[in-house]
Image (cartoon, rainbow, N blue to C red):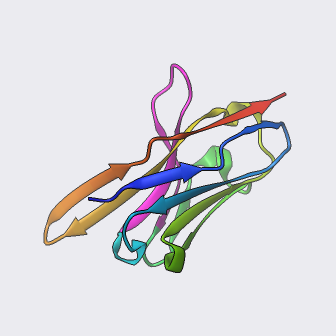
Amino acid sequence: QVQLVESGGALVQAGGSLRLSCVASVNIFGINAMGWYRQAPGNQRELVAAITSGGSTNYADPVKGRFTISRDNAKNTVFLQMNSLKPEDTAVYYCHAHTEFLGYKSDYWGQGTQVAVSS
């Protein structure tokens, strides 16, 4: 089992920045991929950014050039640096971990952290 705890959500003005953190209960070096998803009211949960154990990253088009995902294996933590925030970035942000071991795949989610961007 992997437990994920997010923090860093807040209310911020458009153009501002926030850094989200996700601390895992296990050594993230062995986690195949970690990422951030978000869900706005009335919308489906969508991928924001992901990072593999090898450090490869992937971003959703709306956040490219503004958001940066990174991981600190020593601290079992994944970060999402969000710059130039827009009102449409308002959502609950969820941390996600994907593991694969001997053919078994598992997905884990955090409880979410609220990000609100005012215009």
Side of 118 relative to 53 (left or right): right
Task: Name above or below for residue 9 compared with residue 70.
Answer: above
Q: Is residue 59 left or right of residue 95?
A: right
Q: Tell me where residue 13 appears, x and y as whole percent.
A: 84, 36
Q: Above or below — where is 63 with respect to 39? A: below
Residue 113 in percent (x, y) is at 57, 41
The answer to whether residue 45 is magenta is: yes
- Is 81 or 8 nearer to us in this picture? 8
The picture places residue 85, in percent across and down from the top left corner, at: 77, 43
Residue drawn at 39 percent across, 64 percent down: 25
- Magenta stretch: give its range: 32-51
Query: Which quarter of the figure is the C terminus placed in?
Result: top right
Above or below: residue 30 compared with residue 60: below
- Asked where in the image residue 87 lies, by quadrant, the reply is top right
Say which residue appears at 56% left-offset and 28% top-offset: 40
Does the magenta segment cover residue 33? yes
Q: In the picture shown, does residue 118 fall above or below 86?
A: above
